[in-house]
Image (spheres, rainbow, N blue to C red):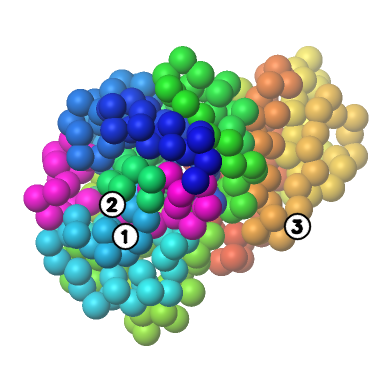
């Protein structure tokens, strides 16, 4: 264990806040068993108190101790995808206080695979409540530098762990009712989950548990952003230029028109997701009037990326 990780575990025990890398995005962590530490976390993120937070564990055994019922489907998904980018919503056990569940009867559980997250969880020895390490509603952080830009004053320590491998938040599956429901798409897709479960996922009900990723505008840059179909991109750029406005463009190939600032994205969804948040931050800092995002393909493999882009542009 490195010095830094030992220091981070000590800070968590003192009720302080530690930002740490995971394979999805960076998290801002607090002792999940301490109401005071979690209150500090919500204040730091300026997060509404009724939004539940995901609780992180070193292994499935630790995670399931926070649930009062562990259905077979949860064991199946945990065996296949943990440690990894999957969060399971289960009925909470008494260990999960109202301050992590937003007062709901369920709790979000995740076992991350990033070696620094694993080392921290083991050194700390308990559960770590951690939302993404960004300001509430804004673009998530996939590098330690981005965490410092957003939360330098709030995090007592930022652990370095390189660029996040996956780049978008974990897939969330709700197993607290009779059926498996996909609440947030992610790197682990619906087809993979259905193959593991041997059944179809149920559609998200209208009264699905509150989750902040479910807010329409989320993962959003400060510059207004809009999605544009590939064949309309050049015309849209022209329209903004005609109004005297500069635009920043996220596209799959170089736009025809002379644009002020543009970034090329990979034509493959896994690589696209990995670069997405850093790209949105870069486009945001270009100081243009508008961000134009070329709409990705309609295929299932792009579902998680489309979800984040739709919210960034809402
Ligand atoms: O990849 C991730 O999941 C990252 C890393 C740090 O682990 N964390 C993350 O946390 O994305 P956050 O707080 O930004 O998003 C957590 C999502 C929210 O949409 C929250 O409402 C939902 O999980 N959630 C947590 N507990 C829940 C519950 N009991 N029922 C429904 N949704 C829940
Ligand atoms: Mg978040």
Residues at marks 3 and 2 touching, judged by CB atoms closer than 8 Å: no
Q: Residues within 10 Å of mark 3 (few under 14, many from 20)?
A: few
Residue 298: x percent and y percent? 61, 61
Q: Which residue is drawn at 49% across and 57% down?
A: 113
Question: Closer to the N terminus: mark 1 or mark 2?
Answer: 1
Whichever of labels 3 and 1 marks the residue nearer the N terminus, that label is 1
> For the residue labelled by badge 3, is the local secondary structure a helix, a strand or a loop?
loop
**What is the C-alpha distance between the residues marked 3 and 2?**
32 Å
Residue picked out by circle 3: 267
Cα separation between marks 1 and 2? 6 Å
Mark 2 surroundings within 10 Å by alpha-carbon count, few (fewer than 14), some (14 through 19), many (20 or more): many
Give whichever of discs 3 and 2 has the lower sequence position: 2
The image position of residue 5, as x and y in percent, is 47, 38
In front: label 3 or label 2: 2
Residue 206 lies, with reference to residue 42, above or below; the image says: below
The residue under the point 47% across, 61% down is 84
Magenta stretch bounds:
92-121
Decide whether residue 227 is among the magenta residues: no
């Amino acid at each position: 264990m490195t010095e830094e990780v030992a220091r981070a575990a000590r800070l968590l025990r003192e009720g302080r806040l530690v930002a740490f890398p995971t394979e999805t995005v960076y998290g801002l962590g607090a002792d999940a068993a301490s109401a005071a530490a979690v209150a500090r976390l919500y204040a730091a993120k300026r997060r509404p108190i009724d939004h539940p937070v995901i609780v992180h564990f070193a292994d499935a055994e630790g995670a399931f101790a926070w649930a009062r019922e562990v259905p077979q489907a949860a064991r199946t998904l945990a065996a296949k995808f943990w440690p990894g980018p999957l969060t399971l919503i289960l009925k909470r056990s008494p260990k999960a206080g109202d301050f992590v569940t937003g007062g709901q009867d369920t709790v979000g559980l995740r076992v991350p695979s990033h070696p620094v997250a694993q080392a921290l969880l083991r050194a700390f020895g308990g559960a770590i409540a951690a939302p993404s390490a960004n300001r509430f509603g804004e673009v998530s952080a996939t590098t330690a530098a981005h965490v410092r830009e957003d939360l330098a004053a709030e995090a007592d320590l930022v652990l370095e762990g390189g660029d996040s491998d996956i780049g978008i938040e974990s897939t969330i599956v709700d197993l607290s009712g009779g059926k498996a429901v996909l609440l947030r798409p992610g790197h682990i897709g619906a087809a993979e989950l259905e193959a593991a479960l041997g059944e179809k996922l149920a559609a998200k009900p209208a009264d699905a548990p509150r989750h902040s990723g479910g807010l329409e505008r989320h993962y959003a840059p400060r510059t207004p952003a809009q999605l544009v179909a590939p064949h309309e991109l050049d015309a849209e750029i022209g329209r903004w230029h005609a109004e005297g406005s500069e635009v920043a463009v996220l596209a799959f190939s170089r736009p025809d028109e002379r644009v002020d600032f543009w970034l090329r994205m990979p034509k493959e969804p896994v690589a696209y997701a990995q670069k997405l948040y850093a790209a949105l931050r870069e486009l945001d800092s270009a100081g243009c009037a508008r961000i134009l995002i070329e709409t990705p393909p309609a295929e299932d493999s792009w579902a998680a990326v489309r979800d984040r882009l739709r919210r960034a542009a809402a």
